[in-house]
Every structure is written in C-alpha cells, then in structure tokens.
Image (cartoon, rainbow, N blue to C red):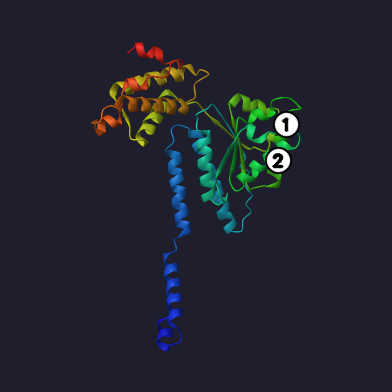
Amino acid sequence: MKRRLEEGSLSVNGAISLLSRVESEAQLPDTHSISEQNIQSIMREVDGLVGLSKVKGLIKEIRAFVEISQRRRQHQLKSDGLVLHMVFKGNPGTGKTTMARILGKLLCELHVLPKGHLVEVERADLVGEYIGHTAQKTREQVKKAMGGILFIDEAYSLARGGEKDFGKEAIDTLVKAMEDYKNQFILILAGYRLEMEIFMRSNPGLRSRFPIQISFPDYSSEELLEIAFLMLRERQYRLSGQAREYLAIYLQEKAGEKGVNFSNARLVRNLLELAIRRQALRLVENKACSREELMLIDRDDLTPEEGDGGEEWISAW
C-alpha cells in the first residue's frame, strides 16, 4: 500500500478504505480460540455442579465423540453422526433441566447445533382439543426448537388417556419430526424414573430412537447442603452457626424420608427463598443494619412453612 501511495496510484479515499479494511481484519478475533475458551468455560460449569458424576461423564463422552468425529473428517475418514435424542429419568430438582440447558450451549459451541437454545414444554403445550389440533401444536413447538433442544417434561403424560387420547397423536408427530429433521434438533424426554421406564417399554419403536438414557439420582443430604451454600454464595448471603446446624439436620431428615414432597435442589431453593424473605421482614425496620446483618441468615429465618414437615424441628432447638 505504501508503494502505491508513493506512486500516486491510490486515491486518498481508496487509501482510507484500504486502511480501514486492514485494521478491521487485524482486529478480527480468532474464532477457533474463542470457541475453545467457551467450551472450556462450559465444561467448568459442568464440573462445578454438585453430584451427578455419571451424567458429567456422559457429557464428556459426547464432547469427546464430537471432537474426534470432526478430526476424522479432516483426515477423510468415515464419521457417522451420533444420534443425540435422549431420555432424562429422575425426580424433580435433580438437575435435568439445568443439564439440558448446558448441553445445548455445549453442542452449539461444538457446531452440532446452530443455536443451542432450550424449548421447555409439557403435555398442554403439545396436545390439542380436537382432531388435527395436536399435530399442529406439536409441529409449532418443534419449529421453535429447530437448531436447539426440545425438552418435554413429564413426557409419559402423553401416553395417558387410552387410544382415543390425543397424546398418541403428539407422539406420532414427534417421531415423524425426528425422521424429517434429522440432526436439526435434539429431543429430550424427561420425567420420573419409573413412569418414564413404563412409558418407553409401552412404545418399543420409541425406545430405539433414544439411544442415550440418563438417570439423575436424588441428592444426598451432604450434596443438598453443598447446593445450599452455593446458592447462598451466589446471592451474597451466609448462614449463622445455628442456622447451618439446623439446615444440616433438616436436610438429613428430608433426604432420609424421600417423601412425596421431596424435591431435591428445588426444596433447597424454596427454603432459602423463604429464609431471604423472612430475613428482609426481620430487618426492614432497622434503618441502620450493617453489611454483615444484611448478609446473615439466622436459624429462625430458615423455619419451613407450616405443613412442610419441618416445624417439628423447631421445638427441638
């Protein structure tokens, strides 16, 4: 460019345009480097999740398979695509939706999915009220999920109601979409373990289309306590000594019962949100409360709602 300027063969406007282009190209980021950084960040997010060791292992397997497949293609080696439709089995609050969201981000960075977004639906979003309505509603949700993941919670509910129920039409429409739009979206069916196993056994053709089936175990009391600490740290709260002891005992009791209302991490989140509201009510009249007081959750703030099965612990303290 300097020589062309000296020779007078480049106009001023042309020189400015060329300089702008050179500067722009110099500032272009290394997309491969950025993508690798994003992948590493996502994998750290996976590793940072409490428990779920088998689930984490599967995520790492999927990442490894995709990367090796890409390398094989670079060397002109045959590389069959991996069918990534999945079944997530587990109780509420065990991380199914969280893992689906992370998986979407990872597969986007790996260029398996162009968008990687998560569309969460349930029976009411798919099943209509008259003939033909269900297929239309289901196709609309599939369309929304194109380039990402369609996540159907309590998927077994689609098979309830007998032969005349429109849920069967939703299943048939989903199966057709899986054939028509291969590798354009991923379908994840989720729900309670036993119900999902019965659902898949009752649909032999459906089972073969979901080669990846993942069980999400209930959290132990120690894992639930760790989740509580992580949630509090993210919100810049902390527990007093008595509150910490109380919460440990309460979660141990709840995890041991595994009652109908036990919802794993969701139980912890709901309890902490209640505690934060109660702390706010306790402090609102104190205009001079310190930073430490604004962060501290005490034992009384953690008292569960009446009827939640935790009030009997109050008298023990």
**Residue under circle 1?**
166
Instruction: Please provide percent x and percent y for residue 210.
Output: 64, 37
Residue at image coords 51%, 46% = 106
Is residue 50 visible to us here? yes
Rendered-image quadrant of the C terminus? top left
**Residue under circle 2?**
136
Q: Earlier in the sequence, mark 2 or mark 1?
A: 2
Residue 13 position (above or below residue 210): below
Using the numbered discs, state the Cα–Cα distance from disc 2 to disc 1 in whole angstroms. Answer: 12 Å
Dot 2 amino acid type = Gln
Is residue 245 visible to us here? no
Q: Quadrant of residue 312?
A: top left
Q: Quadrant of residue 247?
A: top left
- Local packing at callout 2 (Cα closer than 10 Å; few below 14, some 14-19, many 20+) is some
Residue at image coords 64%, 41% = 141
| Front position in the image: 298 or 294 | 294
Residue at image coords 62%, 52% = 79
Residue 284: which numbered mark, if any?
Answer: none
For label 2, the SS is: helix
For label 1, the SS is: loop
Instruction: Please provide percent x and percent y for residue 298.
Output: 31, 23
Residue at image coords 47%, 48% = 39
Residue 268 position (above or below residue 138): above
- Local packing at callout 1 (Cα closer than 10 Å; few below 14, some 14-19, many 20+) is many
Instruction: Please provide percent x and percent y for residue 74.
Output: 57, 58
Residue lying at the far bottom of the rendered structure: 7
